[in-house]
Amino acid sequence: MTKKIDPEAARQHEQYIAHLHENPAIAFHNETRYVIMVISIVCLAWLMGNSLILNFTIICMTDDEHHFTNNTQSASSQIRAGALYHYTNSEKAWLFAAVAIGTIAGTYPVIVLETAMSVRNVFTLFGALSGISTLLVPLSAFIGFWCLFLMRFLQGFALAISYPVLGAIVTNWSSLKQSGMYTAWMSCNLQFGAMFTLPTSGAFCVSSFGWEGVYYVQGTLTLISYLIFYLLFRDSPRIHGFVSAKELKIIEEGKTAIREKKVEPVPYAAIFKSLPIWGVWICCVGATFGYQIFVQYGPIYLNKVLNYEITNTGFMTAFPNLVSCFAKILGGPISDMATCVSAKNRVKIFTIISQGTMALSFVCLALVPPSMVLLAQVAYTAAVAFSGLMWVGPVKSAALVARQHSHFIFAVMSFINSAVILILPPFVNTLAPNNTSQQWAVILYSICGSVVVCTAMFAFVGEAEPAWWTEPDAKHHHAHHRNAVHEQVGSGAPC
């Protein structure tokens, strides 16, 4: 039920809002929303990066001799400046899975806390948890396996906030006309986290500081970044003193629910009956398998299958993420400006380009022998880079269809992401126990098939118009809104 607003209180609130935005102390040239985007990207990147550190340092923090190739003996001697531990294959699988288990465990608390507390407070709390648990990883590894597992679990628990908070920030701080660009650029946090973490981990692994150094550096930077975020961020531009009246008008144009300040509960039943939303979630399953196989196992694939040295592995794992960032930076604005194509067709086209290229790259990787390293690297880069365009495909569709309820859609996407990460260790260990090229070919073909099937589902049911349950008083005017002509966001017009 829609929460009733007292007319007099609403009038006084509007007067306060108007006064707040008349003469902001700092207006950032009417672009405060981009300042919010930048600090949010940085903080989200630390959440992702912190969860990925062990994916690389597991190579150099263990005493398994097979982690090192014959031509990296000098690097091996440097690596042994850091503490070394022994983990069985089962224990390594649990350490990989711990993040996913934590993220799944954190999904419901995130939904509850975002309702009970502000996004600002919840995001800062989860960010602090990620920073502290990262700082404690070296000590936890020294204490024992289960203590290290707990820190990995807490990193995953903190990561559960990333998708919902991204959806909330995009919904509140982006204008409808720039939703594709804002969503795509915000999602660059995934690449930035990997781009910093993986080469930094590689550098510390072969330095005299040892692998522990990367945990201390990233944990400290995480806490500093979230302090800055807490000082700068507000849940809504309406209550931010740095937002001018001009910028507020740009952000809120077309956002009926925000202008009318209706506080609505999430229509769970309607959402779970929505085919376009199911199309987004199913597409997310295939896309996540395709992306996470290289996020979680990229360093191992490059080191074991393509025989990259440890230092090069860090940089070559990070490079595709840099290319993916450029793809998003270009793809986001294009998805907003290409108004000669309807918004619905735009999200479908970008989805097919993104997932289709990734599927073809998997086939190429499966067919190319390890000796053809350059071609394999091109296919590897293309798979990771084009996967990023899903953020202007099904993810943008979710934001446009669900509007003010998109945080819940993103929370389910976070759950899907975690479930896939949880499934990957036994999946990879079963199909590629020895990490041979033939074993990895089976993995690549399997994921290629899932990507194609899931993308086809979205191509049939994907939408880009606000659903009837996003309208004010939707519960009481169900029939009316089902038959109403919805506002066409960026529908067909000359380019």
Image (spheres, rainbow, N blue to C red):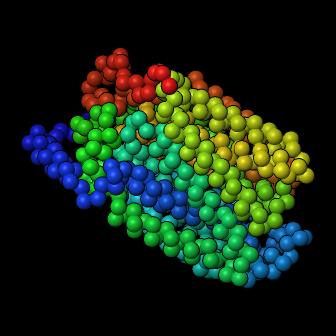
Q: Nearer the viewer, residue 448 or 44?
A: 44
Residue at image x 26%, y 49%?
244
Q: Residue 334, position in %: x, y?
A: 53, 35
Q: Is residue 72 visible?
A: yes
Location of residue 207 (image quadrant): bottom right
Q: Is residue 285 above or below residue 62?
A: above
Residue lying furthest left:
8
Q: Which quarter of the figure is the N terminus placed in?
A: top left
Q: Residue 399, position in %: x, y?
A: 44, 37
Residue at image x 51%, y 47%?
185
Q: Residue 394, position in %: x, y?
A: 54, 35
Q: How many marks?
A: 0
Q: Is residue 193 above or below residue 61?
A: above
Residue at image x 30%, y 18%?
480
Q: Nearer the viewer, residue 82 or 40?
A: 40
Q: Nearer the viewer, residue 138 or 88?
A: 138
Q: Is residue 149 above or below residue 78?
A: above
Q: Is residue 139 above or below residue 468?
A: below
Give the side of residue 480 with respect to residue 458, left or right: left
Q: Is residue 99 visible?
A: no
Residue at image x 43%, y 32%?
401
